[in-house]
Image (tube, grey):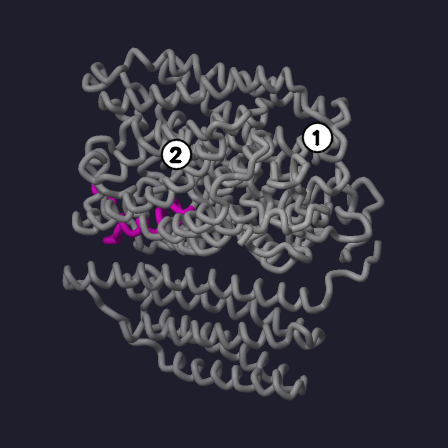
Amino acid sequence: MSTTGIAAPVRAQNRRVLVAALVATVVMLFTAFAAAYLEHQGAARAANKWSPVALPGVVWINTAILAFSSVLAEVFRQSRRRGLLWGAMGLGLVFLGGQVFAWLELRRSGVYLPTNSYASFFYILTIVHAAHIALALVALATAARRPRIASLCVGFWHFLGVVWIYVLFILKGL
Amino acid sequence: MLDHPAPKGFLSRYVFSLDHKVIGIQYIVGAIVMGLVAAYLALLIRTQLAWSGAIQQPEDYLAIVTMHGTLMVFFVVSPLLSGLGNYLIPLHIGARDMAYPLLNMLSFWIYVLASVIMLASFLMPGGAAAGGWTAYPPLSGSESFLPGSGWGQTLWILGMALFITSFTMGGLNFLTTILNMRTKGMTLFRMPLTVWGFLVATVLALLAFPPLTAAALMLLFDRHGGTSFFMVDAVINDQLIAMGDGTPLLFQHLFWFLGHPEVYVIVLPCICLLFEVLAAFTRRPAFGYRPSIYALLCVGLLSMIVWGHHMFVTGMNPWVGKYFSIATVIITAPFAVIGVNLVASVWRARLRLATPMLFALATISAIGFGGVGGLFLGTMTSDIYFHDTYFVVGHFHLMIGTVTMLSIMAAIYFWFPKMFGKMMSEKLGKLHFWLTAPSMMAVFILMHMQGLGGMVRRTYDTSVYTYNEGANSSLTTPITILAMIAVGAQAIFLWNFFYSAFKGQPSGRNPWEASTLEWEAPSPPPHGNFGDELPIVHRGPYEYSPEGVDQDVLPQAAPDPDVASTDTEIPE
């Protein structure tokens, strides 16, 4: 029996299905949080107890950083210049640092995890998102040496950017 | 065409194996071990109920009920199906292994770790989790409500998180393998129904588990981070315990958004594999192959939007309940299609009553009984009466206990020759069947009777409450004795399984003369499953007693027989 492994096209197709399914699970995860948020917001508003906290300004800078990181990653995907990937990953790390800064900022202003429902949701949503970003950074790091998975990793990176916009939409828009 | 070479040492062959067949059997053996624990817990529950007062403390009883439920759903039935799926999917679709063997191995070992953590929770101060397998807060949220809601509940959440990780990894593998790794000629509509069942179940699991992850995370924050997503202020022994102003109902929504599809995740593959067994032992095609698939897809879709029927009496808006009630009744339509196809598959057939067939037939009748009970629970008006009675306990044990266990038994007896190249003893198999199936069915049908009388579930000592007296309470002891017979009979199965695996009669390649691809491989299949060339599929999975051909069965991989297709063409 030959041990040449699974044929390359099948392998590529496998990876696409795997990542698509992963995306679906992440979508369901954040949808569940959004549903929970809406439920809490409705109940709290009915009781006149809903008190959103002003988001620290650094959150908007973080958003810009993540967007720029996505742009770099996309240019890397098309040009395959590895420096751009390191740039994108560096910005991803800066984003994580910025999120930590945002948490500390909130803490300084006396907003803790249990302060109120809105604060709880702010922390849990940003923490879960940051955990995904951290794992995606590991994936991007492997993409540098394995060009065949680069496109999918970059695609997942864009997806997490969209999830971040969704998180902001939940926290500011709903 | 394999990524990993044939293993050499004992460790890489039997312990940290990458081979889907070994991992499948590992899952089955692991689930059998956990099954013994869960069955022991079931007997503890029943002895307490039948001879109450003598045996356990109330807190222990609640912990035993909670852990019995958790272990059975997530650590016995689900991994049994992971095992069968792992073993069967690549063989069924003509692949050499799963798409991601390493992921496969990791998912099994994470399941082992999760099991160990779950069992260890019995040893924690306060004992194992006791807030029910549903872990509803506020009960599950604080030690001040229940001793088991301390460390036991924390380990429960950790164990569940690991289980979800393992199951999701397995699901990603199943999905990728089924969609991409099929051999030449194996189109989607030539796949055996078992594979279809696993495909739909996998999609459901991948979509339904994340919301439970979210709920578990929020519960963890409530317990250890001081948040109040779900917790509410409570009064215990005249003392106000401040917990915040969360919404416990939210947890129930998130839990049942998983909980209901999870029922289908474990039931659908069990129902689908029956078609395969029926076809082989009636020597006729499974009835309604395509309608069954369409019905299966409808059931899968609908199962995602009916979760509220577990929550009719929670104080949820009655209009929402009305919607869930209607949606639930609608799901009976596609389910009836599958049920009718099952019955039609055996209708006026000449039956070969081997052990797998006996279990398959018993499963059909369990589906019938359980399904009818479901109508009463899905209708809001009758559910208000039945809620929290033994009617519910009887119903779900018929569907996700009896249907799944009998069907998995059918599958194990059916595919055992493929797994080990040996036959299980027919005599012991039939003895096992006649002791197991009737007693299991009787236990849960009698529970329906108690529920009709109003017997309340989750009660440590039913005799304390006078309203239980008229509720067919005289049935409690007979149910316990029947349950003991059902559990005791599994000793015969265990002996038969392990003895036959080593000392059984050689089975040959295809002892049941079945048509699907796994029977093309030697028994047990070698590393890589199919030798040098992968089989090529020429037709659908159930071409038994084909017309115009002098053959009992046309296997999927057999080239077209000589009889020209002109014979089967309709003359103009």
Return the mark for residue B130.
Answer: 2
**Where, quadrant-wise, is the C terminus of chain A in this rendering?**
bottom left
Is B149 left, or right, of B41 in this rendering?
Answer: left
Subunit under mark 1: B
Which SS does the magenta portion mostly show? Answer: helix
- Mark 1 or 2: the one toward you: 1
The percent coordinates of residue A25 (x first, y second) are: 47, 60
The percent coordinates of residue B220 (x first, y second) are: 41, 51
Along the line of sight, the residue nearer the viewer: B216 or B205: B205
Is B235 left, or right, of B390 in this rendering?
Answer: left
Mark 1 or mark 2: name the one nearer the start of the chain.
Answer: 2
Q: What residue lies at 31% left-to-right and 61% top-to-bottom? A: A35
The percent coordinates of residue B176 (x first, y second) are: 59, 58
Please, what is the three-letter code of the amino acid marked with disc 1? Pro
Which residue range is magenta in the image? B240-261
Return the mark for residue B511.
Answer: 1
Along the line of sight, the residue nearer the viewer: B242 or B267: B267
Vertical order, A147 against B17 (above or below): below
Is A144 left, or right, of B306 in this rendering?
Answer: right
Is A52 left, or right, of B62 in this rendering?
Answer: left
Vertical order, B517 against B178 (above or below): above
Please, what is the three-letter code of the amino acid marked with disc 2? Ala
Q: Evaluate whether label 1 is on the same chain as label 2.
A: yes
Q: What residue lies at 66% left-to-right and 42% top-to-bottom? A: B554
Subunit under mark 2: B
